[in-house]
Amino acid sequence: MRIVFAGTPEFAVPSLRAIVDAGHEVVGVVTREDAPLGRKRVLTASPVAAAAQQLGLPLLKANRLDDAATEWVRGLDAELGVIVAYGGLVREPLLSLPAHGWINLHFSELPRWRGAAPVQRALQAGEQRLGVTVFRLVEALDAGEVLSRDSRQFAPGTSAGAALTELAGFGTRALLAAVDALAANPSAGEPQAGEASYAHKLSRDDGRLDLAAPTGRVLAHWAGVTPEPGAFVTHEGQPLKLHAVEWAADRHAAGEPGAVGAVDLIDGRATLRLSDGALVLDRVQPAGKPAMDGAAWLRGRGGKAELS
């Protein structure tokens, strides 16, 4: 099938490569424009752009699917459009240009968690079973007919970044199944069923952890906001990012009355006491400094600290 692909981040790359490896003809790739990255703000091509160039595919860099992008796609004579985390909306007349329309690989079990941050919001809510859904793109948000699904269980404390990487890998199976279903039956698809929920885009403030919450809830919150926008607490009036944490196995590390937020070295590890348990701070980043080992950070403060 002649396919135009739209995507931007690293976790869209496996889908692009899977379509090519399956023998489909990718007639064009649309991705967002180069963006400044890192402390030096170096202008960098998106991961999908880099993959498209490696594969020798026609490439359009555009931050909006506007009239110019529509005309570019029109000239490709694609049979199907595939979008995976492009970062922009597909509207008419672009929506109807490919003969079979557009399909989207979405990282949730629709209709749950429609919107921009499905994996992050699901993890924040304490969900461990995460899925992917391939559906027909329509003008309403993430509301089109479903072509294929897949899901699996994740361990508590799996970060959104790690979960997205895994979902991006096994989600290619559902994506290829959807393409095959449309090739065999252009009218394939079933309406979404169940209660819809919305996954709002994350802001920096969403990364602030509530240390008064139960340990499981704190860990779920951390998972949902890692690596972006990043989990943080406050130490001496400054933000302290928590890049890597884990549930403390020792029950003797559980919180004591009045001790919530205290960090001590227990068995050589920086251990944060909470109301009903504790988390080990494996990697932290103080304000204005690089990330470092949590125990090393704590030893630099005499082996004790108070977080809020």
Image (cartoon, grey):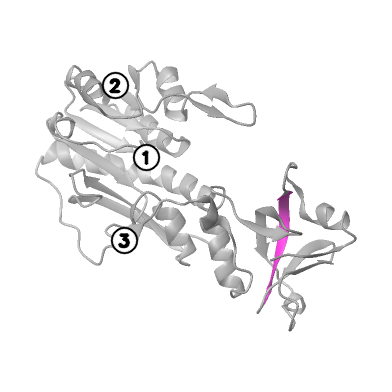
Using residue 98 as the reference point, say whether residue 5 is left or right of it: right
**SS at badge 2:** strand
**SS at badge 1:** loop
Q: Main secondary structure of the magenta part?
A: strand
Q: In which image quadrant can residue 234 be found?
A: bottom right
Q: What is the span of residues highlighted in magenta in the rendered image?
A: 277-285
Find residue 120 and report its horizontal and vertical position in percent: 46, 55
Crowding near the residue tagged with mark 3, few <14, some 14–19, many ≥20 C-alpha atoms within 10 Å:
some
In the rendered structure, are the residues bearing label 2 and label 3 in contact, judged by CB atoms less than 8 Å apart? no
Going by the numbered disc 2, the residue's amino acid type is: Gly
Q: Which residue is mark 3?
A: 112
In the rendered image, residue 279 lying in the magenta stretch gets the answer yes
Going by the numbered disc 1, the residue's amino acid type is: Ala
Find residue 296 and report its horizontal and vertical position in percent: 84, 52
- Quadrant occupied by the N terminus: top left
Q: Which residue is mark 2?
A: 28
Q: Nearer the viewer, residue 219 or 150?
A: 219
**Pointer 1 or 2: first along the chain:** 2
